């Protein structure tokens, strides 16, 4: 069976769109349509229902999709195993994704050292919020991601990668600076939060929920994207924010910001490695992970 036809069919099923599948595959929409029609003709059955606003798989299409996923994963594994037989230095492009916390904390230290050890390798780190990283790994746009929260997604698997501690960052001289505060005290502060999809925000929302609260019960004055933007606002004295302690270590040392601990909230978290389920591990990914785990645990 032509795996190109299967790949085109699977993209249409996952995206519910011929045009989006074509964009992902880097071909024209008619080319994708021809691939799917050829597959339907060979199997003698309709695989996709094209009558609605979105393309939907038929029952036969769903059965084929499940089997095609296994075949494509096996093909990828075989290709990776053959490629891995090559010896010599790592070369080419190694691209991975991270949310802003892990990208600025762990990977910012690991990747330059990994690059120095492998001078023929070009490394590209793409930074998004946690949810976007997970989706790009699930869509196989990225082989690996490192994120600050494990968001349930059927297309990916998570595994612990490193530890992190979150603190409440405050402007110097703020009443909370250097103190343990209660959740009731936190209600009085101007709270600055990261955008939805950020791992720290998800962590705080989960912790508040365990205390019978929601984020809207606090005085949320600003929602400012991701890590650097909220930190800039705190430095300028506009409020307080929850943020990874490692990412503000230099600011704490210089006195540009202070920290507080909120009693009743568990602010230790795991950073997670995320990868697509069923995807064969490339040599680049395998060697980076071996290097990273050794460095993180040492």
Image (cartoon, rainbow, N blue to C red):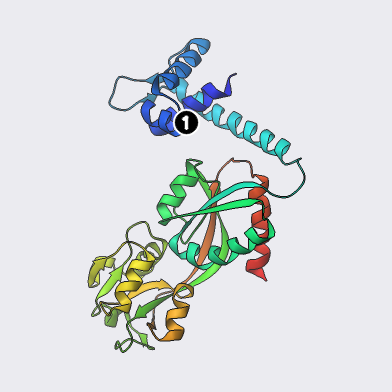
Residue 17 in view (yes/no): no
- Count of numbered tags: 1
Q: Which residue is mark 1?
A: 25
Say if 200 sits above or below 65 in the image.
below
Q: Residue at image x 40%, y 19%?
A: 30
Quadrant in which the N terminus is drawn = top right
Residue 294's x, y, as percent?
Answer: 68, 64
Q: Residue at image x 46%, y 79%?
A: 250
Residue 213's x, y, as percent?
Answer: 29, 69
Say if 185 sits above or below 247 in the image.
below
Say if 76 sits above or below 286 in the image.
above
Residue 206's x, y, as percent?
Answer: 38, 64
Q: Nearer the viewer, residue 92 or 23?
A: 92
The 10 Å Cα crowd at callout 1, few under 14, some 14 to 19, many 20 or more, is some
Residue 168's x, y, as percent?
Answer: 37, 77
Quadrant in which the C terminus is drawn = bottom right
Left or right: residue 202 compared with residue 185? right
- Secondary structure, mark 1, is helix
Q: Quadrant of residue 71?
A: top right
Left or right: residue 278 compared with residue 166? right
Left or right: residue 181 compared with residue 90? left
Q: Quadrant of residue 13?
A: top left
Q: Residue at image x 66%, y 36%?
A: 77
Q: Nearer the viewer, residue 294 or 213?
A: 294
Residue 151 in view (yes/no): yes
């Amino acid at each position: 069976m032509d795996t190109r036809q299967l790949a085109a069919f699977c993209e249409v099923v996952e995206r519910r769109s011929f045009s989006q599948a074509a964009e992902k595959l880097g071909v024209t929409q008619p080319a994708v349509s021809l691939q799917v029609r050829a597959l339907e003709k060979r199997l003698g059955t309709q695989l996709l229902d094209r009558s609605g606003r979105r393309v939907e798989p038929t029952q036969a299409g769903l059965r084929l999709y499940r089997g095609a996923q296994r075949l494509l994963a096996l093909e990828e594994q075989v290709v990776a195993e053959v490629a891995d037989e090559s010896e010599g230095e790592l070369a080419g492009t190694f691209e991975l994704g991270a949310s802003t916390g892990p990208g600025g904390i762990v990977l910012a230290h690991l990747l330059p050292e990994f690059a120095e050890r492998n001078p023929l390798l070009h490394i590209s780190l793409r930074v998004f919020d946690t949810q976007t990283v997970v989706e790009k790994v699930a869509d196989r746009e990225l082989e690996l991601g490192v994120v600050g929260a494990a968001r349930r997604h059927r297309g990916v698997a998570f595994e612990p990668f490193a530890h992190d501690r979150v603190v409440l960052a405050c402007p110097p001289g703020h009443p909370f600076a250097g103190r343990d505060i209660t959740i009731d005290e936190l209600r009085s502060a101007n709270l600055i939060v990261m955008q939805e999809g950020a791992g720290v925000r998800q962590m705080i929302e989960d912790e508040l929920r365990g205390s019978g609260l929601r984020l809207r019960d606090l005085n949320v004055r600003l929602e400012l994207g991701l890590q650097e933007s909220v930190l800039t606002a705190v430095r300028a004295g506009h409020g307080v924010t929850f943020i990874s302690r490692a990412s503000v270590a230099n600011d704490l040392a210089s006195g540009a910001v202070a920290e507080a601990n909120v009693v009743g909230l568990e602010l230790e978290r795991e950073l997670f490695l995320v990868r697509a389920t069923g995807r064969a591990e490339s040599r680049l990914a395998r060697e980076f992970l071996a290097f990273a785990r050794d460095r993180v645990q040492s």
